[in-house]
């Protein structure tokens, strides 16, 4: 019977008896193996296979703008370019060991933009998801800081570009332009400054305080309305009309003055000849020529009228140019103020806002599921170990039992043989 059991193998009941016999060993080994497996999953496996992600959106002064302050288009895909990743690494010494080149080359980082469909047109919502492979980081905390640093790269770029923005008109361009164009430049400069202030006021409010640092190093805080009003009072309508009238009356010219006077003298003579040929002195053409010659005579006194001071002189031209320069300097100073206001607005109004302070992990093994699976596997392994130990002990004791049985059987066999012989 025993030989049959050995041939057929161990029974299920025998297995349970072995487990029951070594129950404390099985339980202890199960707990130990489970704990080791959970730690392995948490600190070794998951960091190698997990993907960390964080959702955020950008807050920029001009929410509807899809460009940087200098007009460069903004594309969210540039956030994960190698150059952007390198810029992010420069923000903290702890990022020095992160292999961003490998991360970029092997698609270890990616960004996704949320979209919605409006009237069958797909539009971006402004919400982005930045995803990184956990294997590139020493800890989850480092991954969080790195994602934030990467998201902040466009913000810093916005702020730096805003510092370099300029609303001024180049001085040499203004000084070398004809007087008519200078008047036009002054009008356009003022209009541009007011339009920009109106844009900021529409984004915030006219009572929004902006603190700027002046050219002398001093700091001041004023309302947007106050900054705008400082432009309104410059180069007003009365000044514009006065300068325009003076230019027309004085006939001021920027260039070779003597050549211009000679040109005017020839024009005066042609007009006089044409007037003499016109019999009807009340005709429209005669009146036009006469008005023009009166004007030229006022400018350079072609007629030689005694006591008349011509207006087209170098002194008058220089004085007029100086007046224009004063108006230009005033507006250009306010353009510099606007540039500092803009830089301050971008500095305080640009940021990346995250929806959560922690990363979301995906693609990894959940601790609950991993713990349960580890517990089951650890129990089976512990049972196998207990079984192996028991079988090893039985095999070790089996030869001793067989030897003891053979020694007890020898006398009986001798006695039996003797009886038969007798």
Image (spheres, rainbow, N blue to C red):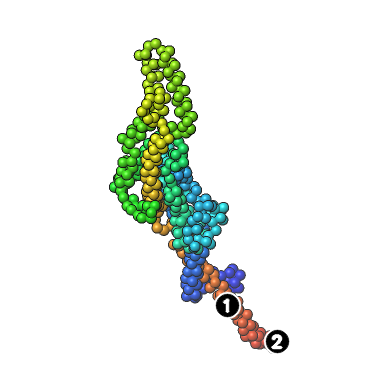
In this rendered view, identify the residue nearer to me: 224 or 201. Answer: 224
Considering only vertical position in the picture, is 145 above or below 289? below
Residue closest to the eye, 77 or 344: 344
Classify mark 1: helix, strand or loop: helix
Q: Is residue 300 visible?
A: yes
The span from disc 1 to disc 2 (Cα, nearest Å) is 43 Å
| Quarter of the rendering occupied by the C terminus | bottom right
How far from the left and from the top, in percent, is residue 144?
A: 45, 59
Residue receiving disc 1 = 393
The residue located at (35%, 34%) in the rendering is 243
Foreground of the two, 319 or 161: 319
Query: Given the current orientation, which residue lies at the most extreme front position?
Result: 306
The residue nearer to you, when weighing 405 against 85, is: 85
Residue 248 lies in quadrant: top left
Q: Are marks 1 and 2 in contact (CB under 8 Å)?
A: no
Q: Percent from the top left, x then y, of residue 278?
A: 41, 12
Residue at far right of view: 421
Residue under the image location 45 percent in, 48 percent down: 164
Q: Which residue is mark 2?
A: 421
């Amino acid at each position: 019977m025993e030989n049959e059991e050995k041939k057929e193998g161990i029974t299920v009941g025998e297995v349970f008896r072995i487990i029951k016999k070594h129950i404390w060993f099985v339980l202890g080994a199960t707990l130990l193996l489970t704990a080791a497996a959970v730690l392995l999953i948490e600190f070794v496996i998951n960091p190698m296979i997990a993907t960390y992600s964080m959702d955020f959106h950008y807050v920029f002064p001009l929410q509807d703008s899809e460009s940087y302050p200098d007009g460069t288009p903004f594309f969210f895909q540039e956030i994960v370019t190698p150059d952007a990743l390198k810029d992010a690494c420069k923000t903290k010494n702890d990022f020095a060991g992160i292999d961003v080149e490998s991360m970029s080359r092997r698609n270890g980082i990616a960004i996704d933009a949320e979209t919605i469909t409006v009237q069958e047109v797909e539009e971006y919502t402004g919400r982005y998801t930045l995803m990184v492979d956990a294997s590139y980081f020493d800890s989850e905390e480092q991954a969080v800081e790195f994602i934030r640093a990467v998201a902040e790269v466009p913000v810093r770029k916005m702020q730096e570009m805003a510092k370099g923005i300029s609303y001024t008109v180049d001085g040499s361009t203004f000084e070398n332009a004809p007087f008519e164009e200078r008047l036009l430049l002054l009008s356009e400069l003022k209009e541009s400054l007011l339009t920009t202030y109106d844009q900021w006021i529409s984004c915030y409010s006219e009572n929004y305080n902006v603190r700027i640092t002046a050219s002398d190093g001093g700091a001041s805080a004023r309302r947007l309305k106050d900054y705008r009003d400082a432009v309104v009072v410059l180069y007003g309508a009365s000044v514009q009309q006065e300068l325009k009238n003076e230019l027309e009356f004085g006939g001021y010219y920027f260039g070779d003055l003597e050549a211009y006077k000679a040109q005017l003298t020839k024009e005066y003579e042609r007009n006089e000849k044409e007037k003499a040929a016109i019999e009807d002195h009340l005709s429209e053409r005669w009146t036009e020529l006469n008005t023009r010659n009166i004007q030229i005579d006022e400018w350079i006194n072609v007629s030689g009228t005694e006591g008349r001071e011509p207006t087209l002189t170098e002194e008058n031209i220089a004085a007029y140019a100086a007046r224009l320069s004063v108006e230009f300097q005033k507006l250009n100073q306010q353009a510099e103020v606007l540039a500092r206001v803009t830089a301050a607005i971008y500095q305080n109004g640009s940021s990346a806002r995250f929806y959560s302070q922690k990363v979301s992990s995906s693609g990894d093994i959940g601790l609950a599921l991993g713990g349960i699976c580890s517990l089951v596997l650890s129990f089976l392994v512990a049972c196998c170990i207990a079984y192996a130990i028991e079988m090893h002990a039985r095999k070790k004791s089996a030869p001793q039992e067989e030897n003891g049985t053979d020694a007890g059987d020898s006398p009986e066999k001798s006695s039996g043989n003797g009886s038969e012989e007798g």
